Image (cartoon, rainbow, N blue to C red):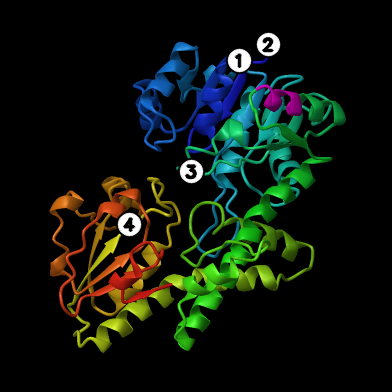
Amino acid sequence: MDKIAVIGLGYVGLPLAVEFAKQYPVVGFDIFQTRIDELNSGFDRTLELEAHEVKEAIKNGIIFSTDIEALRECTVFIVTVPTPIDKNKRPDLTPLIKASETVGKVLKKNDIVIYESTVYPGATEEECVPVLEKFSGLKFNEDFFCGYSPERINPGDKTHTVTKILKVTSGSTPEIADKVDSLYRSIIVAGTHKASSIKVAEAAKVIENSQRDINIAFINELSIIFNRLGIDTNEVLEAAGTKWNFLPFRPGLVGGHCIGVDPYYLTHKAQEVGYNSEIILAGRRLNDNMGIYVANQVIKLMIKKGHKIEGSRILVLGITFKENCPDIRNSRVIDVIQELQEFGVSIDVYDPWASANDVKHEYGLELLNTQHSTLNTSQYDAIILAVAHKEFHTFELAKRENQIIYDIKSFLPKSLVDGRL
């Protein structure tokens, strides 16, 4: 039986490792000792798994470790590390290269390395394979082999979990493609789709999120237009949505580690082969500027109600990149906050899901340390509902005279809000 190593135990790697551990011997490897210690105690800070699920995996024999020696007996290595962008919005493959170096140091003859991290077409064979060859001294497709099976985890989604999402698979040879496909089919009840090549599988993943990004950008642009026309965007979308083939996208901030990042991987590769993307980058630019647009809309509404902007107080509800999830990576709520701060506004942020330490480290912000039942919302000149956490369903806003409430997510009753996307 294959012994599987999962490299990177975040939102993607941990659920995958735990699922494989039900049938195979598994080593879950991560470079952060704190993460390993938490998992060995049964705690998952991503909240993707309950404590009993982690403890059951440990009982099944899974090993959580930062020690490379724990990987030496593994025969299949699955890499699930982040693939972010740098400050210039270019692909940052550092985590992927470092993970490949780690695997290369323990790689043996006939081992298989499967990448799940989102990349541009060609990255596995052009960027990762040379690293594996260098650190292992082995020859690709002779001594060791590769596969690519893009992650499709939806953080915070308890319905579409890892085994219930159809998995795209691929391999560096037809035989390895069959083996990779069989490996995933053993745990994925939704089934698999075997792509014809690693490049096809890479491309399939990167366009999934690029497509969503472009569609949301279109709706965001409609929101800007309809706002100028004095039309409620959501009422328009509800009316248009009565047609069977209308796509149900909604306006909003587009962040996170996938939709707000992946299009830049595709356009980077396009530029390498001499093509400058027009539609994809236009959608990205529009979505990247939505936080600034929201902040300016709030300021305009405050001015209309006679507020002195400098020194005014604004409460932002939510800092994570999506609802009911503690993930703050690439949250575009920060764009709203930073733009408002440029006006000299005092900002308080409340989020029942986010880690105060993570928010402080990532964005330099102090979260309000309170329960929503004791939060006095009447003291603020404006309130911005930025993330539709379930806790805000029961949130009672004691709206005072002249107070502005802006609803980015169209989550609150329309009668309560002064503006929304």
Q: Which residues are magenta?
A: 180-186
- The residue nearer to you, when weighing 414 against 193, is 414
Report the residue at 68% width, 27% height from top.
184
**Residue situated in front as seen by the camera: 268 or 9:** 9
| Sequence-first tag of 1 and 2 | 2
Labels 1 and 4: the sequence-earlier one: 1
Disc on the earlier residue, 3 or 2: 2
Q: Quadrant of residue 319?
A: bottom left
- Residue 9 position in % (x across, y down): 49, 32
The residue mark sitting in front, 3 or 2, is 3
Numbered mark located on residue 155 in the image: 3
Are the residues at dot 1 and dot 4 in contact (C-beta closer than 8 Å)?
A: no
Disc number for residue 1: 2
SS class, disc 1: loop
Q: Nearer the viewer, mark 1 or mark 4?
A: 4
**Visible residue check, residue 289:** no
Find disc 1 in the rendering and name its residue. Answer: 24
Q: Earlier in the sequence, mark 3 or mark 1?
A: 1
Question: What is the quadrant of the N terminus in the image?
Answer: top right
Give amino acid for label 1: Tyr
- 407 vs 103, left or right, is left
How far apart are the two marked residues, 3 and 4, measured between alpha carbons? 16 Å
In the rendered structure, the answer to whether residue 316 lies left or right of residue 28 reads left
Q: CA distance from mark 1 to mark 2?
A: 7 Å
